[in-house]
Image: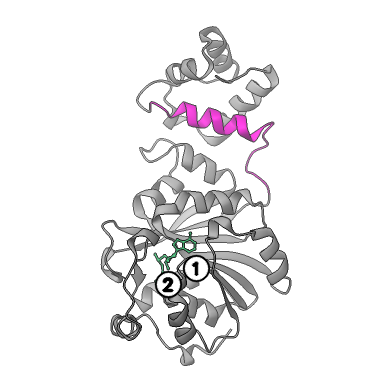
Amino acid sequence: MKDNKMMKRIATPSNTKAILAKHGFSMKKKFGQNFLIDQNVLSNIVSRSEVGPTTGVIEIGPGIGALTEHLAHHAKKVIAFEIDQTLQPILADTLGGYDNVTIIWQDILEADLAEIYAREFAECESVSVVANLPYYITTPILTKLIESRLPFKNLAVMMQKEVAQRLSAKPGTKEYGSLSIAMQLYADVSIILNVPKNVFIPAPNVDSAVVRLAMLDNPRVELADEETFFAITRGAFVQRRKTIQNNFNVLFQDKEYVISLLEQCGVSPQTRAEAIDLETFAKIANQVVLDGKKLV
Ligand code: SAM
């Protein structure tokens, strides 16, 4: 943690343009490069991510260091993964003075997170992920972080607003689906900041939002088999407008079984998946495992 008065403010519009010009850097669409240029947005992300002097942070995609700088001032330690090696001279320039920041020049999807977690964060009280994500791989990154089963405190990540709404959606809404259920199984999910297009260079085509996933110590419900649970929740939403019975008929290819399963679990066959909460999906999945029923 450093004195805030010493902050360079890498990411004001004029500083960003000057840094890019100095290094002759042009943004790469293929890496989802949209850089933040608003100091208020940056400090709000950090404060609402609950990053403090004992927190270790993993950042994904530091870019020219806009968010990294704010994190370095508030966290104990920052480990940032960046795929684009051509940013090396820029980050050496912008973050050179920060001894609590390490850049790992690697695709986050290839990283051995367990090894890095064990090696880098022994002295931190908690570890969180804070990132303005490359939007083209939002779901694979979140899946990787969650499947790692590492004891992260928060995942505070900026993404396309529409995806943020799906992740945090409650039953009975049109955004609610298998992605909401998959994330809410492991975390309390909320949108902590809405972010307009005009605070990025270049401005993306879509609005953005920062989601905080406050990770639970254990999954929200007890599951006999997670694979079955995910297969069932995905299958339930394949045709959103159809009833749960119709979707399950396709999934199980056994109409009689579907009728008895739904009856046993107290779910009306005419219900649509979007009205079924996570606990009820867990009940259904556990019953399927108990029955030894195979999915098609
Ligand atoms: N954090 C910076 C900011 O807020 O201004 C940049 C955010 S930009 C949306 C996404 C960053 O992720 C870019 O720097 C990009 O090069 C990097 N990136 C893209 N794919 C990546 C990957 N697979 N692994 C690590 N970094 C990646």
Q: Quadrant of the C terminus?
A: top right
**Which label number is shown at residue 43?**
none
Mark 2: C-beta under 8 Å from nearest atom of ligand 1: yes
Disc ID at residue 63: 2
Residue 279 horizontal side relative to residue 131, left or right: right
293 vs 94, nearest the viewer:
94
Q: Which mark is residue 82?
A: 1
Residue 43 seen: no
**Which residues fall within the magenta stretch?**
218-239
Give the secondary structure at mark 1: loop
- Residue drawn at (35%, 37%) of the image: 174
Q: Residue at x 56, y 34 (%)?
A: 230
Helix, strand or loop for disc 2: loop
Few, some or many C-alpha atoms within 10 Å of disc 2 (few <14, some 14-19, many ≥20)? many
Is disc 1 in contact with disc 2, using a CB cutoff of under 8 Å?
A: yes
Query: Within 8 Å of ligand 1, the CB of disc 1?
Result: yes
For badge 2, the amino acid type reads: Gly
Q: Splitting the image into 4 quarters, where does residue 119 fall?
A: bottom right
